[in-house]
Image: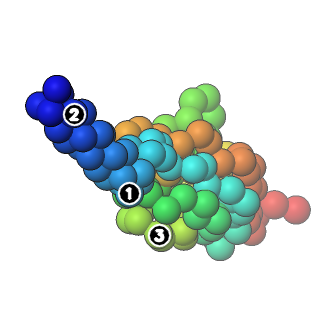
Amino acid sequence: MVVLRNLYIVLTVISFAIVLNCSADKSISNGVPDAPSELTGTALSSNTIKLQWIDNSDNETGFSVYRKIYDDYIDIGSVEINDFIFTDESLPSCSFVNYYIVAYNGNGESSRSNRVNIPLICSDRP
């Protein structure tokens, strides 16, 4: 009877330690990062756009930037943890460009940020 009681105590202590360890590990308790928000973009020239957003997560390892010019969104680059600015300098002149951002970590990607549609500056437009 004493052996069973001691085994019960040991198992209870181990279970409690596992629960404490899991709640301290954000990657276990939080999973994928929260989505970035308030994405905005500013056309700096006829082929350059600067994007900015709010970082709402505390467990991301970076952000991926997705762009759509004609048909489909493609991943065009990423920035490091806690960075919230991306400059896209490889655009065709006088385009309308769409973007969204996702945060990512080892558990996957967040949901998408809001999408923005940004017209580029065109000096040859009337």
In the rendered image, residue 109, in percent from the top left (x then y), is placed at 47, 41
Q: Residue at x 70, y 68 (%)?
A: 42
Taking the image as shown, residue 30 lies to the left or right of residue 2, namely right
In the rendered image, residue 90, in percent from the top left (x then y), is placed at 48, 58
Mark 2–mark 3 contact, CB under 8 Å? Answer: no
Q: Which residue is mark 3?
A: 82
C-alpha separation, residue under disc 3 versus residue under disc 1: 21 Å
**Looking at the image, is mark 3 or mark 1 earlier in the sequence?**
1
Q: Report which quarter residue 107 is drawn in.
A: top left
**Looking at the image, is mark 1 or mark 2 earlier in the sequence?**
2
Colour scheme used in the picture?
A: rainbow
C-alpha separation, residue under disc 2 versus residue under disc 3: 49 Å
In the rendered image, the quadrant that contains the C terminus is bottom right
- How would you rate the neighbour count of disc 3 (Cα within 10 Å): few for under 14, some for 14-19, many for 20 or more? some
Whether residue 93 is visible here, answered yes or no, is: no
**Looking at the image, is mark 2 or mark 3 earlier in the sequence?**
2
For mark 1, give the secondary structure. Answer: helix
In the rendered image, residue 14, in percent from the top left (x then y), is placed at 23, 43
- How would you rate the neighbour count of disc 2 (Cα within 10 Å): few for under 14, some for 14-19, many for 20 or more? few
Up-down relation of residue 104 to residue 47 (above or below): above
In the rendered image, residue 78, in percent from the top left (x then y), is placed at 41, 56
Q: Which residue is mark 1?
A: 24
Q: Residue at x 65, y 48 (%)?
A: 113
For mark 2, give the secondary structure. Answer: helix
Q: Residue at x 61, y 29 (%)?
A: 71
C-alpha separation, residue under disc 1 versus residue under disc 2: 29 Å
Q: Amino acid at mark 1?
A: Ala
Nearer the observer: mark 2 or 3; the answer is: 2
Return the residue nearer the eye: 34 or 114: 34
Q: Residue at x 73, y 60 (%)?
A: 38
Q: Which residue is mark 2?
A: 5
